[in-house]
């Protein structure tokens, strides 16, 4: 089959969207997002409680592009556990770059609106030291690119994005639409994501940046209070449909079909994240009660936030972060281990610190969960 080519006349699609089909899904999706955001607003330490979900998002968004690292492997690497192969190490670095790029964008958005400058800066961090470091980090492409199976050419690709010579104009239209007062913000976000992927403005990293755009946009528009929204699990689980719906935009001008798919993804992920956040909060309260039953030591209770933010960690990191002497840190960690809260996954040996794991939290972050 001949490749599908980008169609500049297709964007923006506002006058061709079937709002009769979209409206029934907009309401439930908006409610699901608001319910999730309200849950996070009601707890005193949301960033700490859902920190593992941010790592999971980076893992799954990168997995769509072909990496195989798991959340556990990423956290083990951060705790000093060497990956089993150079390939796995590169996978982990890509995931960590994703998180660093999100932090870079968040910092920039404190002073700037969401714009192409922010996206370019995030892209530079995303590709730093990773497999794509030779793909012009932070620079829009100046040559043609295409999407297809490994080894495909421009003639055998499944999709050919906008020509390099027209990319500046295409990005200008995209950024103008980004700041356009749209009829519905969630539909606008769906359109922005699809158009960004169709433009494919960088040599590498476009898919990850397009998915990163989702929480950044929701935050910028005041739909959520912090950019803690995780879309990639739905796209990864429905990867074939994800690619097909995106392709159908340029092939069939089917923007409505794409928007319906995107709204369903947002609704499903809002409900999934709500269920996980509730389970994590319940685990936090339960763990606090367990610690209080084991000891009244202030250091032990203060350590809860650390182990929820770092479900895999070394004893040295724990001691440094909590400002504890080594003997005091060992005492607290032994209480947690003997009480069944933490598991010792690597004993201390020589200069190597012991590694502990909070398995119950990882199971909630990584496993299947019913809303």
Image (tube, rainbow, N blue to C red):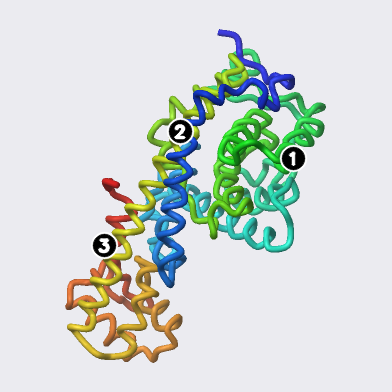
Q: Residue furthest top?
A: 1
Label 2 vs label 3: CA separation? 37 Å
Q: Residue at x 68, y 30 (%)?
A: 199
- Category of crowding for the residue at label 3, using alpha-carbon neighbours closer than 10 angstroms: few (below 14), some (14–19), many (at least 20): some
- Circle 2: is it few (<14), some (14-19), or many (20+) Cα within 10 Å? some
Image x and y of residue 18, in percent: 56, 22
Question: In the image, which disc is placed on residue 359?
Answer: 3
Mark identifier at residue 175: 1
- Residue 15 visible to the viewer: yes
- Earlier sequence position, callout 2 versus callout 3: 2
Say which residue appears at 38% left-offset and 63% top-offset: 81
Mark seen at residue 25: 2
* Quadrant assignment, res 170: top right
Q: Secondary structure at mark 1?
A: helix
Query: On the picture, is 177 further left or further right than 68?
Result: right
- Secondary structure under the numbered disc 2 in the rendered image: helix
Residue 128, visible in the rendered structure: no
* Residue at (44, 46) in percent of width and height: 31
Quarter of the figure with residue 191: top right
Decide: marks 2, 3 in contact (CB < 8 A)? no
């Amino acid at each position: 089959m001949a490749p599908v080519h980008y169609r500049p006349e297709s964007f923006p699609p506002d006058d061709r969207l079937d709002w009769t089909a979209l409206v029934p899904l907009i309401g439930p999706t908006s409610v699901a997002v608001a319910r999730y955001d309200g849950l996070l607003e009601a707890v005193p330490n949301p960033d700490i409680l859902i920190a593992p979900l941010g790592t999971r998002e980076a893992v799954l968004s990168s997995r769509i592009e072909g990496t195989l690292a798991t959340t556990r492997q990423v956290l083990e690497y951060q705790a000093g556990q060497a990956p089993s192969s150079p390939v796995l190490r590169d996978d982990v670095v890509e995931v960590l770059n994703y998180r660093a790029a999100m932090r870079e964008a968040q910092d920039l958005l404190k002073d700037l609106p969401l714009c192409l400058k922010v996206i370019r800066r995030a892209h530079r961090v995303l590709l730093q030291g990773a497999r794509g470091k030779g793909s012009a980090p932070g620079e829009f492409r100046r040559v043609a690119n295409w999407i297809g199976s490994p080894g495909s050419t421009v003639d055998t690709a499944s999709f050919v994005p906008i020509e390099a010579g027209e990319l500046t104009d295409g990005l200008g239209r995209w950024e103008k639409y980004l700041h356009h007062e749209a009829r519905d913000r969630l539909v606008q976000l769906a359109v922005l994501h699809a158009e960004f992927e169709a433009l494919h403005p960088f040599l590498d990293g476009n898919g990850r940046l397009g998915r990163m755009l989702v929480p950044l946009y929701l935050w910028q528009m005041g739909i959520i209070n912090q950019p803690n929204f995780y879309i990639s699990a739905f796209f990864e689980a429905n990867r074939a449909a994800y690619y097909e719906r995106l392709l159908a935009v340029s092939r069939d001008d089917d923007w409505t079909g794409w928007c319906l798919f995107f709204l369903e993804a947002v609704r499903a992920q809002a409900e999934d994240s709500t269920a996980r956040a509730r389970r994590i909060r319940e685990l936090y309260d339960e763990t606090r009660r367990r610690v209080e039953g084991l000891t009244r030591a202030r250091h032990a209770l203060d350590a809860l936030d650390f182990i929820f933010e770092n479900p895999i960690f070394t004893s040295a990191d724990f001691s440094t972060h909590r400002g504890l002497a080594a003997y005091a840190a060992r005492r607290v960690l032994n209480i947690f281990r003997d009480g069944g809260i933490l598991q010792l996954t690597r004993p201390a040996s020589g200069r190597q610190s012991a590694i502990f794991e909070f398995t119950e939290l990882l199971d909630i972050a990584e496993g299947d969960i019913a809303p």
